[in-house]
Image: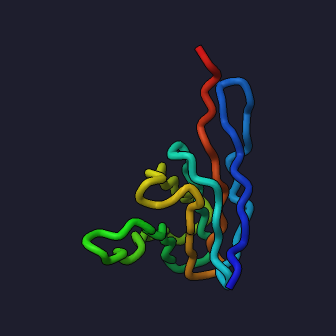
Amino acid sequence: MARAPVTVTKVSHLTPVPMAAAVTDAANDMQFVNDGHTFVLVINTGASARIAQAVIIEAIDGVIPAPIDYNIPAGPGLPVVLGPWDPQTYGSLMLFNTNHADLAIRAFTVFAPPM
């Protein structure tokens, strides 16, 4: 199954960015570029709590651990922010799962201009 790509929005002190979740693909799960400064806003538009998962790619003693589960409470007024994730553990291409179409996400990375 091919994962749905999620565009990562760059956030800085110079550019206001709407914090609305935009993408959902519970059937195919999602992926986005992970630079170690990337985080995800998750909104649950349903009436029941749901699960989002961050997939670990780095093996520990030859075994890849199960994905990290995040409980996302019900209700659109309760957005959850997850991340950032270390690219050495989670990969430069972050694999992100949702268990229901009620969950919508938006990925952001913090961009700092050179000093």
Instruction: Please identify the residue farthest to the left as the structure is shown.
Output: 61
* Residue lying at 74% horizontally and 61% vertically, measured from the top left: 22
At x 71% / y 61%, what residue is drawn? 6
Residue 38 position within the rendered picture, expressed as x and y whole percent measured from the top left: 56, 48
How many numbered marks have been drawn onto this rendered protein structure? 0
- Whether residue 1 sits left or right of residue 83 in the image: it is right
The image position of residue 7, as x and y in percent, is 74, 55
With respect to residue 85, does 16 lie above or below?
A: above
User: What colour scheme has been applied to the protein in the rendered image?
Assistant: rainbow
- Residue at image position (73%, 33%) is 16
Q: Residue furthest top?
A: 115
Decide which of 40, 88 is in the foreground and name it.
88
| Position of residue 61 measured from the top left corner of the image (x, y, whole percent) | 25, 72
Q: Position of residue 83 (x, y in %)?
A: 48, 52
Give the position of the N terminus as an image quadrant.
Answer: bottom right
Residue closer to the observer: 94 or 78: 94
Query: Which image quarter: residue 14?
Result: top right
Q: Is residue 23 left or right of residue 51?
A: right
The quadrant in which the C terminus is found is: top right
Residue 29 picture quarter: bottom right
Vertical arrangement, residue 88 with respect to residue 112, above or below: below
Residue 105: quadrant of the picture: bottom right
What residue is drawn where x is 72% and y is 72%? 4
